[in-house]
Image (tube, rainbow, N blue to C red):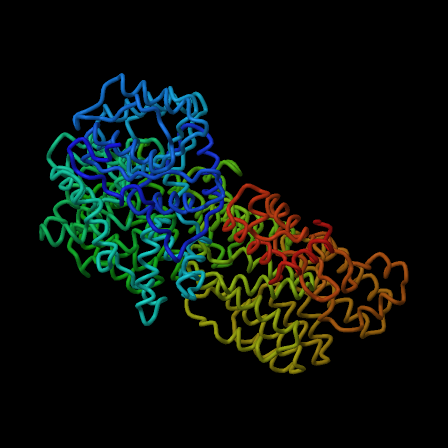
Amino acid sequence: MDHRAPTGDPMLTARFTPPAVPELLVHRPDLLGRLAAGACGPLTLINGPAGSGKTVLTAHWAADRRAPRPPMWLTVEPDDAPGAFWAYLLEALHRGGVTLPAEVGRPTRAEGVTRSFLVRLADGLAASPQPAVLVLDQFDTAQPPATAEGLDFVLRHAAGGLRIVLTSRSDPLLPLHRYRAAGEIVEIRHADLRFTHEDAEALLSEHRLDISQSGIRRLMERTEGWAAGVRLCALAMQRSADPEAFLRQFAADRTTIAGYLLTEVLDAQPPPTQDLLLRVCVTDRVHPDLADALTGRDDGARTLAGLARDNAFLEQIDASAWYRLHPLFAEVLRAHLRERCPGLEPRLHGRAARWLARTGRPTEAVLQGAAAGDWPFAAAQLVDNLALGRLLTGLEADQLGRAFAGMPPGTAGAAPALVAAACRLAAQDLSGGEAALRRADAALTDSSGPAARLGRAFLGVLAGRAAGDLRATERAAGDADRLLGELPPPLLAERPELRALLPAHLGAAELGSGHLDRAEATLTAAVAACGPPGAEHPGTEYPLCDALGSLALVALLRGRLRRATEHARACLALAERSALPPARRAGVDHLVLAGVAVEQNDLPAARCHLDLAAAATGLRPDPATTARAAVIGARIALAEGDGDAALAVLRAVAPARLSDRVVDELAVAESAVHLARGDAEAALQVLDAPAADGPEHAVARARALLALGRGSCAAQALAGVPGAADDGVAMPVRAHASLLRAQLADADADAEEARRRLAEALALARPEELRRMFVESGPWVRRVLDRDPQSARLHAWLTPGAPVRTARAPRADGQPAVVEPLSAREVEVLRKAAELLSTEEIAAELFVSANTVKTHLKSIYRKLCVTRRSDAVHRAQDLGVL
C-alpha cells in the first residue's frame, strides 16, 4: 500500500499523533462526559478561540484507554488541498486499524477526489464491523469548500461506520443546521470551555500556588476564563516573587499573553482586518457603523461578523448589532496601537466620542471624550443631557468619576466647572465643591442654556444639604424646580431621577434642620416621583433609597417605630433587589433599625445593626444624620453599661453646621449618660448650653431635676409638656413625660396618681413596644406594677425576653434573630445545607453555579448574624424558618 501523499511527499507521522496531555491538567469530567457521549453519534464539534483548550480536552479524552477502540487522530493543516486531506484521512484510518476494501483506492491528485472515490469510501466504512472514531483537529473554514462537502457526504452515507470529533476556531463549512435538526451533533462551545473559578483554583493548586479567593476572582475577571490566559498567568506567577502582587499589577501587554495573542490572533488576519482591530480596540464595545467611522471604510459589518464567526476574541453582544473584544485582547491591541501609531489613540477616542454623541449614547460619549482629553466636550455631554447627577449616584458614578479624575484643575468653561463641583461633592469635599461652583457662577452667562443653569441649581441643592444650610438648599431647589419647566419634556422623560433627586435632598435638609412635618411631606413626594413600588422608574433606585432612609429616620424621631422599620426594610429590600453596590449605600437603613432596637431594649439586634451601618462604605451622611447616628450609638453603649464610650461618641461630633434642634438632641443624649453615671449636676448643666425650649428638652431637664431631688422644679419643667392626648408631640416624649409624672407621684407617696400616670405611659408606649425608657427609670416601675397583678399581666411585654411583634426577638443566647428576612432562594439553599450537601452539590441540585451558592450563604450568614453554616442551620431551625 502506498503511504505517500498525492504530491509524492511522505506522510508526516506527527499529524497522526495526539498532543501529549499536559502534566498539570485541570480534570473536567463534565466536558469529557459530553465528548464521550458525542462520539457515540456521527458528529461532535468543539469550537472555540485560540487557547481555549479544545485540543487539550480532546487529547485528554483520546488518552483514555477504556474505549474498545481508541479514537484515531489527524491534525488538519490549513493549506491541505482536498486530495491531500483525503490521503491523510485514509492513512489515519489505516494506522488506527480500520481495514477498507482495496477497491476504495487512494487519491492520486492533490487538487481533489472523484465522487466515485467518496462513494466507495462511505460504502467501505459502512461495511466495517466496528465504527471508526476519528478526531479532526484544527478543521477550520480555511479548508476548501470541496473538502467539507466531501466529508459531509461520507459522514451521512457511512451508515454509522464513521464518527467525527472535530475541533475548530470557526464553524466548519458543514451543514450544521441539518445535524442539529436530526439531533446528530454534540457541540462544545467557547462558553463551555471557559474555566470556572473552581477550575482556575485547581490549576493554580497544581502549580503549587496558594492564591487568595480575591486574587482568583481578579484573575477570572481579567481572563474571563480563557484557558491559555489562566495557564500563562499561572506560569508567570510561579516565576514571580509575589504572585498576589503580580495579579494586582497584571498588565496583559507586558506578559507572554501579548505575544500569544499578537501571533495567534492578530497576525493571522489580513492587513485591513488588523487595521480595523487596532482602531476599534479604543472602545469597550463596537457597532459596525462605529467601526466604519473609525476606519474610514465601509466594511465594518462584514469584517466584525467574520471575526465573531471565527472566534477571533470578538463576540456579538446578545444577538444585537454590537460586538465586544475580549478585555485582554483589547488591552494588548491598545498597547500595540500606541507602539505602531503614536498619537493616533486620542484621535480615535475623539471620533468615537462624537459618533456616540450623535447616536444618543451620552455616557459612552463622555467616557470617550475624557479618554481623548477633550474635557469641554466630555463635560458638556453630562451637563447638556442633564446627567450631572450620575456623577454622584447610579451604577455609572464610579466609572464617570474615574474618567474625570484626570481633568486639569481650573479647566475653562461652565460645564467643566460644574463637573468639577459634582466630582468634589461626590468625594465629600465640600470646600472644593463650593470653590468649583464659584468658578461655574463666573462662567455662566445670561445666554447659558437651561440645562447648565439647572445643573448649577441641582449642585446647589447638594451643597446646601452637605453644609446643613436649609435656606441655601431651599433657594437652589426653587431655582431647579423653575428651570425644570423650561426644559423639553422628552429630555426630562429620559431623566426620571431628576424629579426624585431634588425632593430627596431637600427633604433630607429639612430633616437635618428639625422640620419633621415638612421633611416627611417632601420625602413622600420624592418616593412617589420614583414610580409605583416594585416598578420604579429606571435610574431612580438611588434617590428612592435615600428618601426611604430619610423617611425611616423621620419616623424614628417621632417614635413611630413600626413605620420606621417598614421604611428601613423597604430601603434594604430595594438595595438588594436593585443590586446597588455597597460602595454607594450610606447605611441609614441599618442605623434606623439600630435605633428601633435600642428603644425596644433589643440590645444585641441594636448592636448588630449599628455595626452594619458603620461598615457601610457609601457616601457619608449629612451632618445632622451623623449627629443622630452618634446619639443612637451612645444610647446603645450606655445600655451596654459603657458610659465612657457613650460620652466619647457624642463628643466626637462637631457642632458646626448643625441646627439648634440637632444640637439639643446631642445635649439630651449626653444628659442621659451623666444621669446613668450618677452625675445629676452634670446632666442638668449640659442642658443649659443649648438655647432650646422644646418638649424633649423639658423632659430631659425634668429627669435631671428629679434625680437631684428637686421634685417641684421637675414638675414645673413638665408643666410645659403637652398631655398624653396631644398628637402634636412625639409619642415617646409624651410617654416619657407621663412616666416622670408617675415617678413624681410615687415619690410623694400618691400611689393612685402614680398608678394612673404609669398606666398612661404604658398605654402610650405599648403599641410601639418602647421598653428602654422604663428600664432606664429604675426599679420603682416594677414596684408599682407589683401592687397591681392585673396590670402586671397586661404589660408582660415589658419583661425582657417577652415576645415582640417585629420578628426580631432576642434568643436565649442574647443574639438577634434576624437582621432581615431570608429570600425564598436563600431558604432553598439553607434547606440543602441542612441536608449536609456540599457547595457544589447544592449548586447542582438548584441548577446554579457554586459561586452563586456562596453568595447566597454569605447573605444568609449576615441576615442571621452567624459566621458558620452549621450555626445558620441551627438558628433557622430555632426560628421556624426550616
Residue 585 visible here = yes
Vertical side of 825 occupied by 112: above or below? above
Nearer to me, 639 or 795: 639
Give the percent coordinates (x, y) of residue 119: 31, 18
The residue drawn where x is 85% and y is 65% is: 785
Give the percent coordinates (x, y) of residue 133: 40, 34
Give the tally of numbered discs: 0
Q: In this view, does 36 lie to the left or right of 231?
A: right
Q: Is residue 6 left or right of residue 517?
A: left
Nearer to me, 393 or 122: 122
Nearer to me, 440 or 205: 205
Vertical side of 194 occupied by 787: above or below? below
The residue drawn where x is 46% and y is 45% is: 65
Give the percent coordinates (x, y) of residue 164: 37, 31
The residue drawn where x is 25% and y is 26% is: 106
Q: In this view, does 633 lie to the left or right of 773?
A: left
Quadrant housing the N terminus:
top left
- For residue 739, what is the image quadrant? bottom right
Give the percent coordinates (x, y) of residue 107: 22, 26
